[in-house]
Image: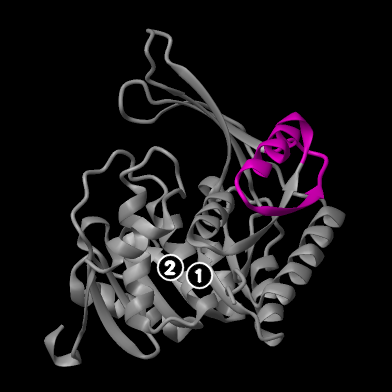
């Protein structure tokens, strides 16, 4: 009998409608309109990997209407909390090969009742799933009251929900105060937020220990072409990823986060968890779509990811 797809809740407080101009056959290029934002990209990769993701997100205005309509094509169950302010959006031009931002909406804080509704919807979906990924906002716009992330993580953990976060700055510190099972963070973010003094191995490993001291159980640090360093189930691990030709590095971290959540939901061992995460991130950079990929290809690529345990004396 086929196994049912594992359910994973994704908390997405700041969805984004993305408008991107790509190269086309003519000089004008091609216009692409898609749902976006960190939470959606994580949820979409979860769907590609074979999970049944539930995205809990606020939507409002014309941009929210378009976002809600488009998301139905991506295999993601969405629980919409209707809000007064329009959903965020941006316009990027990629005809030159790199992303050039033309315009981006400023996100506004959610109202008190909107926050309550979003919180309740997230608790319900996360309790049903047993695994919840908490994502942040584009450019750290403050859409939620201070302390919301702490309260949410604490309530989820108190009810036996495995909490994974891909955050930085104050949002990360808030979730750590509530207690987190897995923190996924990039090497650059680790240094930028002061957890590590530099990107050298010893400094990154020390940063991992600081995150654990502050409330994380497991930590995975992505290192772009350098693979990843992690502490999973008390073991320090180093992963060396396959070399891939990048088309767009954006979204690789979100793909890794999705893979970590999928591995948690399916009970994978630490080595297999890290292999899957690194493979998902590597596969994503070969594609134009953020948080996209093929499960079979990712699983095959994971075989080529080398994972070794780091002895404390060999740092």
Counting residues from the start of the chain, the first of labels 1 and 2 encountered is 2
Q: Is residue 255 above or below residue 18?
A: below
How far is disc 1 from disc 2 in space, using C-alphas?
Answer: 13 Å
Packing grade of label 1 (10 A; few <14, some 14-19, many >=20) is many
**Which of the 4 image quadrants contains residue 2?**
bottom right
Q: Relative to the observer, which residue lies in front, 145 or 183?
A: 183
**Which of the 4 image quadrants contains residue 213?**
bottom left
At numbered mark 2, what does the secondary structure look like: helix, strand or loop? strand
The residue stretch that appears in magenta: 60-87
Residue 292 position, x and y percent, is 45, 48
Q: Nearer the viewer, mark 1 or mark 2?
A: 1
Q: Quadrant of the C terminus?
A: bottom left
Q: Relative to the observer, which residue lies in front, 192 or 237?
A: 237
Residue 54 position, x and y percent, is 67, 60
Count of numbered badges drawn on the protein: 2
**Which of the 4 image quadrants contains residue 187?**
bottom left
Mark 2 lies on residue: 184
Residue sitting at x 65%, y 68%? 149
Q: Is residue 299 visible?
A: yes
Q: Which mark is residue 225?
A: none
Say whether marks 1 and 2 touch (CB < 8 Å): no
At numbered mark 1, what does the secondary structure look like: helix, strand or loop? helix
Mark 1 lies on residue: 262
């Amino acid at each position: 009998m086929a196994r049912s797809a594992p359910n994973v809740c994704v908390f997405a407080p700041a969805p984004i409608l993305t408008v991107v101009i790509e190269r086309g056959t003519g000089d004008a290029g091609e216009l692409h309109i898609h749902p976006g934002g960190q939470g959606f990209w994580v949820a979409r990769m979860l769907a590609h990997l074979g999970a049944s993701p539930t995205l809990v997100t606020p939507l409002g205005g014309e941009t929210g209407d378009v976002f809600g309509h488009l998301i139905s094509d991506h295999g993601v169950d969405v629980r919409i909390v209707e809000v007064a302010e329009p959903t965020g959006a941006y316009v990027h031009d990629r005809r030159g090969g790199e992303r050039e931002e033309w315009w981006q909406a400023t996100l506004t804080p959610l109202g008190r009742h909107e926050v309550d509704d979003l919180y309740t919807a997230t608790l319900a979906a996360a309790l049903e799933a047993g695994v919840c990924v908490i994502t942040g906002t584009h450019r750290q716009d403050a859409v939620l009251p201070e302390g919301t992330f702490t309260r949410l993580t604490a309530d989820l953990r108190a009810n036996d929900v495995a909490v994974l976060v891909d955050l930085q700055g104050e949002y990360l510190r808030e979730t750590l105060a509530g207690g987190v099972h897995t923190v996924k963070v990039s090497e650059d973010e680790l240094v930028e937020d002061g957890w590590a003094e530099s990107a050298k191995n010893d400094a990154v490993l020390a940063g991992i220990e600081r995150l654990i001291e502050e409330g994380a159980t497991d930590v995975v640090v992505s290192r772009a072409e350098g693979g990843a360093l992690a502490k999973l189930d008390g073991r320090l691990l180093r992963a060396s990823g396959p070399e891939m030709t990048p088309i767009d590095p954006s979204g690789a971290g979100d793909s890794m986060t999705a893979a970590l959540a999928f591995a948690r939901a399916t009970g994978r061992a630490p080595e297999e968890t890290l292999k899957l995460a690194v493979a998902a991130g590597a596969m994503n950079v070969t594609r134009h779509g953020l948080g996209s990929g093929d499960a079979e290809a990712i699983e095959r690529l994971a075989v080529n990811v080398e994972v070794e345990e780091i002895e404390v004396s060999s740092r």
